[in-house]
Amino acid sequence: MKNPQAKFCAFFAMFIVLLFLFACDHSKPLDRNINGNSDMLLAEQLRHQGSYDSAIVFFRKSIAKNLELHQYDLWLKSVMGMMDCFRSKGDGTEAMRLAEQAQAIAISNVDTASKTYNNFIHKKAILYSDKRQFDQALSLYSRNIKIYTSIPGSVDTGLALSYNGTGTVFLMQNRYSEALGQYEKAVDIYTKGGNIKSTNFASSLQNIGIAYSMTGNYEKAEQFFLKSLKVNQDILNPTDSKLATLYLNMGRFYQIIRNDSKAIEYMKLAEDSYLRNNQSNSIEAGSLFLNMGVVYIYAADYQRAQSYLNKSLEIITAKAPDNLSNLLTIYLNMGFIAEK
């Protein structure tokens, strides 16, 4: 039987990119100046805690309230928050449906050159990337780049995000040198704008590492991964749940280069972070446990591998049953263990 992990390793680097695209969207602090819109504020807090179903309830309330009051900027921000929730749950179809529905309203009620609308377009481009509809994604990223670059002397982080998104599309198309060029443009914008202490800057650094890893330059990749992690460790609270995702990505990288002890070290840090933040039953923890199961298979510790795969299966079937790729990977690896 063909070792299923070999296929899964190739999948890792791409999955890291998708996680980091989403991390870019989550990196901003909560906006507490939203005209007393308590539903939106509560929804954002719940989303950042990984309580997506509860967040969706309050985003719906905020959407209805702001639409009724013709507060279209706040309405669109609430729509984007709900899109993020559905995407995190693995329901990209519903997220795209919301995006299409919202755009039909926004086009005549929101300033289409505003930062809010540009951010909405960015999120829709990400959804197209998820669906591997690359032409549509690139069209939206190009649209934003054109708007940002039309402002003389402007150094906008939105432009950096657009270059970062474009780079990810190229990466998913195996156009690695072009992807690297886009990520480097994003890093240059953050550096020139003095935004080097931000998680978005760290994201672009990590994506450079991903581009290098995809070409087999693991030494360069490790350098940028560690730079990215250092930026995040310097600016995030040690108990911040975002660190769990970063540790998980480091663990994935070391798994790819078959440094199993390092992989386990970082994945354990991720597991500890989820436990501290009472998120050990979250979708993100389910992804972590899946990866820990695989790395323990590599280490030939099949009992631990089975234990983590069981945890992952329980979480994903309960909270992300539409995530067929993860479910397939779990069953493949369970089958591999059963043959041992």
Image (spheres, grey):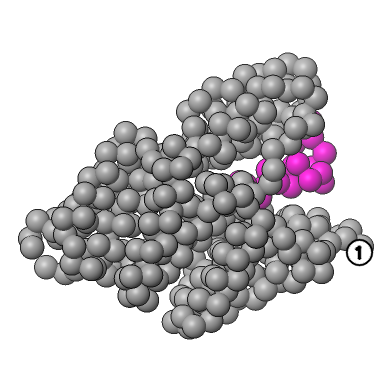
**Direction right: furthest residue:** 152
Compared to residue 116, the image places residue 70 above or below, namely above
Q: Is disc 1 surrounded by few (<14), some (14 to 19) or many (20+) residues within 10 Å?
A: few
Q: Horizontally, is 95 left or right of 205 in the view?
A: left
Residue drawn at the location 62% of the way across and 33% of the way down: 44
Task: Please name the residue that numbered disc 1 is placed on.
Answer: 153
Q: Can residue 273 be seen by looking at this rendering? A: yes
Q: Quadrant of residue 167?
A: bottom right
Residue drawn at the location 65% of the way across and 22% of the way down: 39
Provide residue 95's location: percent of width, then percent of height: 53, 38
Q: Quadrant of residue 262?
A: bottom left
Q: Quadrant of the N terminus?
A: bottom left
Q: Quadrant of the C terminus?
A: bottom left
Q: Horizontally, is 337 left or right of 238 in the view?
A: left
Provide residue 220's location: percent of width, then percent of height: 53, 81
Provide residue 234's location: percent of width, then percent of height: 65, 60
Q: Main secondary structure of the magenta part?
A: helix
Judging depth in this view, the residue of 182 and 273 nearest the camera is 273
Describe the element under mark 1 as helix, strand or loop. Answer: loop
Magenta stretch holds residue 188: no
Compared to residue 95, the image places residue 214 above or below, namely below
Residue drawn at the location 77% of the way across and 69% of the way down: 191
Q: Which residues are magenta?
A: 107-128
Compared to residue 224, the image places residue 39 above or below, namely above
Judging depth in this view, the residue of 303 and 314 nearest the camera is 303
Judging depth in this view, the residue of 189 and 121 nearest the camera is 189
Q: Can residue 22 be seen by looking at this rendering? A: no
Amino acid tagged 1: Gly
Magenta stretch holds residue 122: yes
